């Protein structure tokens, strides 16, 4: 599977409890733009609006800027393709306290663009520091340093 975009902020700010795979409703030129590596999901989030899950805040610039419709919006809300059962469970989770839906990565699976959604809980400041410390220790162990 090829990763086209990742959201490093999601892994830093949130504890990912569970992940889901969702399809995206896209136009042809948006698919080409994503496959060329121009898309970004940094700072984006998933919200269920009137029973439909949407990806909000993602940026998909036009594939060919000079050959694009005048009404094209690169920051438009994009519909996600999920089953009714998954949508209902996400609605229940979203209403509970402290649960957030964050996009983790945008990738291709058998030439179809998919979005990995993380069901997450926000980290506190001391948890973020602890995660950074663990990463530093793992990095120094990998390098062969015994001091940590």
Image (cartoon, rainbow, N blue to C red):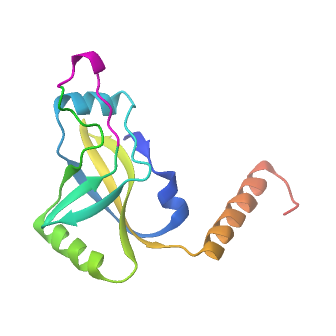
* Residue 33 x %, y %: 31, 29
Occupied quadrant, residue 76: top left
Task: Name the quadrant of the N terminus.
Answer: top left
Task: Name the quadrant of the C terminus.
Answer: bottom right
* Residue 93 x %, y %: 28, 77
Residue under the point 53% across and 73% down: 123
Occupied quadrant, residue 107: top left
Residue 64 visible (yes or no): no
Tell me if residue 82 is in the magenta stretch. no
Tell me if residue 62 is in the magenta stretch. yes
Residue 137 visible (yes or no): yes
User: Residue lying furthest top in this view?
Assistant: 66
Instruction: Provide the residue span drawn in magenta.
Output: 59-69
Occupied quadrant, residue 88: bottom left
Residue under the point 12% across and 67% down: 51
Is 49 situated left or right of 37 in this image?
left
Residue under the point 62% across and 68% down: 128
* Main secondary structure type of the part rendered in magenta: loop
């Amino acid at each position: 599977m090829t990763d086209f975009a990742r959201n490093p902020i999601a892994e830093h700010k949130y504890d990912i409890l569970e992940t889901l795979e969702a399809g995206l409703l896209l136009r042809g030129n948006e698919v080409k733009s994503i496959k060329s590596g121009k898309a970004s999901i940094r700072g984006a989030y998933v919200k269920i609006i009137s029973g439909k899950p949407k990806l909000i805040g993602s940026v998909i610039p036009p594939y060919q800027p000079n050959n694009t419709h005048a009404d094209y919006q690169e920051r438009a809300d994009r519909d996600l393709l999920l089953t009714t059962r998954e949508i209902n469970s996400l609605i229940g989770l979203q209403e509970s306290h402290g649960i957030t839906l964050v996009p983790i990565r945008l990738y291709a699976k058998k030439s179809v663009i998919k979005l990995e959604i993380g069901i997450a809980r926000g980290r506190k400041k001391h948890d973020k520091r602890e995660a950074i410390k663990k990463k530093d220790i793992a990095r120094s162990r990998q390098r062969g340093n015994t001091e940590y």
